[in-house]
Image (cartoon, rainbow, N blue to C red):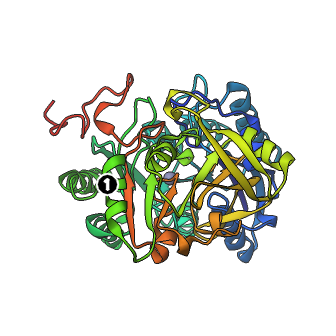
């Protein structure tokens, strides 16, 4: 019995002007068959689970590529061909496999390939027509018919923030094993919810919806229920939320259940989305908040985890213009400033031109006079159980204890330790701003008096009423309130 495993993950913001190249994988995570020898991160958790389960059963495990890049623009063709080629060559060299499990993102777009995961699954199927093929996807994926046609099993994360990668990987392993032995014959059907938005699963109506999806998996004949939330910042034909249902050889039940769950999700559309503030309104609330711990503002428009550059200055400009004190703000991606600060050394006062460099989505650079409080390399921050890299980090102080964190590796803020490891005391702050959408939410909750999601401008601006889609052929909410009628 042979199990083949691999992961390839980046989430492509097709509106981002920065391409994703091999350097993006090299600087974030790139291993060639030995990723499970080190501690897991979000997209390698599955590999650890699959290897452990298979080895406990005495199976042979062939581990191939593990490649992860921070989201940016389209992956270059040369890079995509090399990564896809490595997976296929490893599979071919192994002489195929009985079960093939891939942890992919589901929203990777390369030059000339809008559906990389469907393309990979199709080529794997061609190489191994009789294998059981299972795909584990991030829920921020574009679920395509091509993925479903090429594989036997597809399941998505259920939780956002994503803390269930291991659980989903274990489920996929079980279903693949039962499929291989002939105990079940999975069929998959999807329903297009015609919705483009972001949905935090930990509270409110969305929590109830996810719990009902999970409960439905115990119903007779149903093997798995996923909600692919979709990834909004991509001009591809399959953008938007889809419900995916797997049944045991019952296509009618799969289609009906997918439609029923999808229609329920559509009915909940106003309740499952998070209320957002404008930047000025949010800062007015901070001024009115008083003591009781720091207010945390999410700089949603510049989340590099969604492919934004990570160097926008709209939030920083507003903080400085209002002369706010006791602020921590980050993480600004500016390798030039990092280099200058490294060369100057800790304790040096400098004039710096910070951020605002990649394009108009980044705003204007901000000129500051600041002191280099700390420089550190090799740090990480937790995302669920995994540890994500932070690059070389610089802590700058300007004004009245306005602490700015800058680094040279594009990453969103996941955890307070991104600030605290440098020596910044977040409990002494009245305001903390984080370039992130939702992943920071749980870890910051214990230290925050209040968290406000701010719809700042930028490469991941969460205004979904007017996206520049050219390939989507159906109407969608919130561009229209009634997408099923148009
Ligand atoms: Zn995601």
Q: Position of residue 369 (x, y in %)?
A: 66, 45
Quadrant for residue 346, please give it: bottom right
Q: Which residue is mark 1?
A: 254
- Disc 1 on helix, strand or loop? helix
The quadrant of the image that shows the C terminus is: top left
| Nearer to the camera, 378 or 450 | 450
Tally of marks:
1
- Residue 298 is left or right of residue 72, and the answer is left
Which residue is painted at 49% across and 67% down in the image? Answer: 183
Q: Position of residue 380 (x, y in %)?
A: 71, 63
Residue 232 visible in image: yes
Q: Position of residue 238 (x, y in %)?
A: 40, 35
| Nearer to the camera, 396 or 461 | 396
- Residue 371 is left or right of residue 198, and the answer is right
Q: Position of residue 147 (x, y in %)?
A: 50, 41
Residue 247 visible in image: no
| Residue 406, placed above or below residue 336 | below
The quadrant of the image that shows the N terminus is: bottom right
| Nearer to the camera, 393 or 151 | 393
Would the CB of label 1 be found within 8 Å of ligand 1?
no
- Residue 249 is left or right of residue 45, and the answer is left
Which residue is painted at 76% across and 73% down in the image? Answer: 58
Which residue is painted at 63% across and 57% down in the image? Answer: 43
Quadrant for residue 19, please give it: top right
| Nearer to the camera, 136 or 288 | 288
């Amino acid at each position: 019995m042979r199990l083949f495993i691999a992961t390839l993950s980046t989430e492509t913001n097709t509106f981002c002007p920065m391409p994703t190249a091999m350097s993006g994988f090299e600087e974030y995570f790139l291993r060639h068959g030995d990723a499970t020898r080190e501690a897991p991160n979000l997209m390698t958790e599955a590999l650890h689970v699959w290897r452990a389960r298979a080895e406990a059963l005495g199976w042979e495990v062939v581990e191939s590529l593990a490649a992860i890049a921070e989201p940016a623009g389209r992956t270059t063709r040369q890079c995509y061909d090399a990564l896809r080629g490595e997976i296929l060559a490893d599979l071919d060299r192994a002489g195929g496999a009985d079960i093939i499990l891939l942890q992919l993102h589901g929203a990777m777009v390369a030059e000339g390939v809008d559906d990389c995961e469907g393309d990979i699954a199709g080529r794997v199927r061609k190489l191994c027509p009789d294998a059981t093929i299972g795909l584990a996807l991030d829920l921020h994926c574009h679920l395509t018919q091509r993925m479903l046609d090429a594989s036997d099993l597809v399941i998505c994360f259920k939780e956002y923030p994503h803390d269930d990668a291991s659980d989903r990987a274990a489920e996929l392993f079980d279903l693949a094993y039962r499929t291989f032995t002939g105990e079940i014959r999975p069929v998959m059907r999807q329903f297009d919810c015609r919705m483009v938005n972001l949905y935090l699963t930990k509270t409110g109506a969305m929590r109830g919806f996810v719990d009902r999806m999970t409960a439905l998996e115990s119903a007779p004949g149903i093997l798995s229920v996923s909600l692919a939330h979709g990834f909004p910042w991509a001009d591809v034909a399959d953008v938007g939320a889809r419900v995916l249902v797997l049944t045991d050889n019952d296509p009618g039940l799969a289609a009906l259940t997918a439609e029923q769950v999808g229609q329920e999700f559509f009915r909940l559309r106003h309740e499952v989305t998070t209320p957002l503030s404008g930047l000025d309104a949010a800062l007015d609330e901070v001024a009115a908040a008083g003591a009781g711990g720091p207010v945390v503002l999410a700089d949603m428009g510049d989340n590099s985890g969604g492919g934004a550059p990570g160097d926008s200055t709209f939030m920083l400009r507003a903080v400085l213009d209002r002369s706010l004190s006791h602020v921590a703000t980050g993480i600004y991606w500016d390798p030039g400033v990092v280099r200058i600060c490294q060369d100057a050394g800790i304790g040096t006062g400098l004039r710096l031109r910070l951020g605002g460099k990649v394009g108009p989505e980044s705003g204007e650079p901000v000129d500051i006079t600041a002191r280099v409080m700390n420089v550190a390399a090799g740090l990480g921050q937790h995302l669920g159980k995994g540890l994500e890299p932070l690059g070389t980090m610089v802590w700058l102080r300007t004004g009245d204890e306005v602490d700015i964190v800058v680094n040279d590796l594009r990453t969103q803020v996941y955890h307070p330790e991104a600030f605290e490891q440098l020596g910044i005391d977040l409990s002494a702050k009245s305001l903390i701003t984080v370039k992130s959408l939702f992943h920071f939410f749980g870890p910051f909750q214990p230290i925050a008096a209040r968290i406000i999601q701010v719809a700042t401008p930028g490469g991941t601006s969460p205004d979904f009423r007017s996206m520049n889609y050219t390939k989507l052929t159906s109407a969608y909410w919130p561009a229209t309130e009634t997408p099923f009628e148009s």
